Image (cartoon, rainbow, N blue to C red):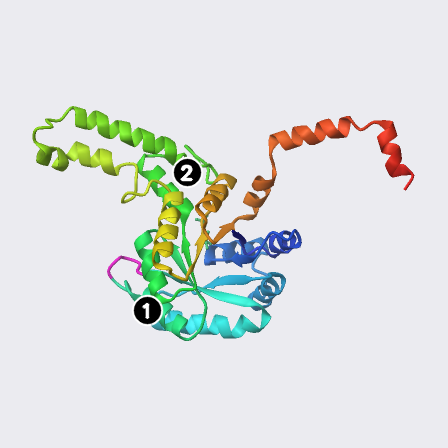
């Protein structure tokens, strides 16, 4: 599995690249905003992006800022033409750029199609369902980015949990636990129904609530979203690479790797979390304490 860094922070990129573990970078307008604010607005954006491209050994995703087909095509060409000589820019286009689910519904897909036909590599972003991923791949996207963490957030929201109060952004979402609870909940609701009238049971509001509460159209987590997309792309030999995105902790990275996803894009803090283990720290403390003089002398004489 390739690892991308999900950041617009040049120091983080340089450091992670120097470790040899980073294959690319993904940015978005919010990450660029953070990098600019950190420098109190005193940043030449063009030079800054050039620096990111120069230090990154692989693709760097840069996102458009408009939502209409015409504007997104124009912006994507600007980004690609301006930066392609410095590295491997990939242009992020929202799979659906509608602000209200009514207008601009097809603009994202049309843009992906148009730019891919022109040979510009596209990362279809804000993918929240396997259906969207399938459409983006068919439209020609080089990459599709399912946002795993945001699906976990959505499921926690539905349970009434509040981020920052009931859970932190980086907390693992225990979807196996929730799946077990779902099974038990459905069993207990159904056990109270008259099983001689299955039509009534199927249409019962309590049954409907129990079967839909803990999942998003059958998906119990961001990990399941990515697993479904990996399966669909394998089934049909779709060529787009899948970037597991919106990753918030190391355990998600492991689960993405088990699924066999092509790429995971991770924030810098997740890289550290992947490396640290309390038993490794305990072990290194013991080893350091146990170094004896005769062994030390081997290193002194050289
Ligand atoms: C991916 O390309 C996005 O930049 C990113 O993963 C979004 O993550 P977030 O949901 O933590 O903001």
Residue at horizontal 92%, vertical 39%? 301
Residue at image coords 57%, 45%:
271
Q: Which mark is residue 110?
A: 1
Q: Is residue 294 above or below residue 21?
A: above
Q: Residue at x 68, y 29 (%)?
A: 283
Q: Secondary structure at mark 2?
A: loop
Disc 2: CA contacts within 10 A as few (<14), some (14-19) or many (>=20)? some
Along the line of sight, which residue is nearer the eye, 133 or 110? 133
Comparing labels 2 and 1, the label whose residue is closer to the camera: 1
User: Is the C terminus in the top left, top right, bottom left or bottom right quadrant?
Assistant: top right
Q: Which badge, 2 or 1, is on the more N-terminal residue?
A: 1
Name the quadrant containing residue 279.
top right
- Residue 163 numbered tag: 2
Q: Main secondary structure of the magenta part?
A: loop
Q: Looking at the picture, does residue 75 appear above or below residue 224?
A: below
How many numbered discs? 2
Q: CA distance from mark 2 to mark 1?
A: 35 Å
State yes or no: residue 100 in magenta.
Answer: yes
Please provide percent x and percent y for residue 241.
Answer: 44, 58
Q: Does the magenta portion include 259?
A: no
Q: Are marks 2 and 1 in contact (CB under 8 Å)?
A: no
Q: Position of residue 127 (x, y in %)?
A: 37, 54
To which quarter of the image does residue 189 belong? top left
Residue 143 visible at all: yes
Left or right for 211, reference 274: left
The range drawn in magenta is: 97-102
Q: Mark 1 near ligand 1 (CB under 8 Å)? A: no
Using the image as rendered, state which of residue 176 and residue 258 is in the foreground.
258
Report the side of 233 relative to 44 (left or right).
left
Relative image position of residue 276 (x, y in whole percent): 61, 37
């Amino acid at each position: 599995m390739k690892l991308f860094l999900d950041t617009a922070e040049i120091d983080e990129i340089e450091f992670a690249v120097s470790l040899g573990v980073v294959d690319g970078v993904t940015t978005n307008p919010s990450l660029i905003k953070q990098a600019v604010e950190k420098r109190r607005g005193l940043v030449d954006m063009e030079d800054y992006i050039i620096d990111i491209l120069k230090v990154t050994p692989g693709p760097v995703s840069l996102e458009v800022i408009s939502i209409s087909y015409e504007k997104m095509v124009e912006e994507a060409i600007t980004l690609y033409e301006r930066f392609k000589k410095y590295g491997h820019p990939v242009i992020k286009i929202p799979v659906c750029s509608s602000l209200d689910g009514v207008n601009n519904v097809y603009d994202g897909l049309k843009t992906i199609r148009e730019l891919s036909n022109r040979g510009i590599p596209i990362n279809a972003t804000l993918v929240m369902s396997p259906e969207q991923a399938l459409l983006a791949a068919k439209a020609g996207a080089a990459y599709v980015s399912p946002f795993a963490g945001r699906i976990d957030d959505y499921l926690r929201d539905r349970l009434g949990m509040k981020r920052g109060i009931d859970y932190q952004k980086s907390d693992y979402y225990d979807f196996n636990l929730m799946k077990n609870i779902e099974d038990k909940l459905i069993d207990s609701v159904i056990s109270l129904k008259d099983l001689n009238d299955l039509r009534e049971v199927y249409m019962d509001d309590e049954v409907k609530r129990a079967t839909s509460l803990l999942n998003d159209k059958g998906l119990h987590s961001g990990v399941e979203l990515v697993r479904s997309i990996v399966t669909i792309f394998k089934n049909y030999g779709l060529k787009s690479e899948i970037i597991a995105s919106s990753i918030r902790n190391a355990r998600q990275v492991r689960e993405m790797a088990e699924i066999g996803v092509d790429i995971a894009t991770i924030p810098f803090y997740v890289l550290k979390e992947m490396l640290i283990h309390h038993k490794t720290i305990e072990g290194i403390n013991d080893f350091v304490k146990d170094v004896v003089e005769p062994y030390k002398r081997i290193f002194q004489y050289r």
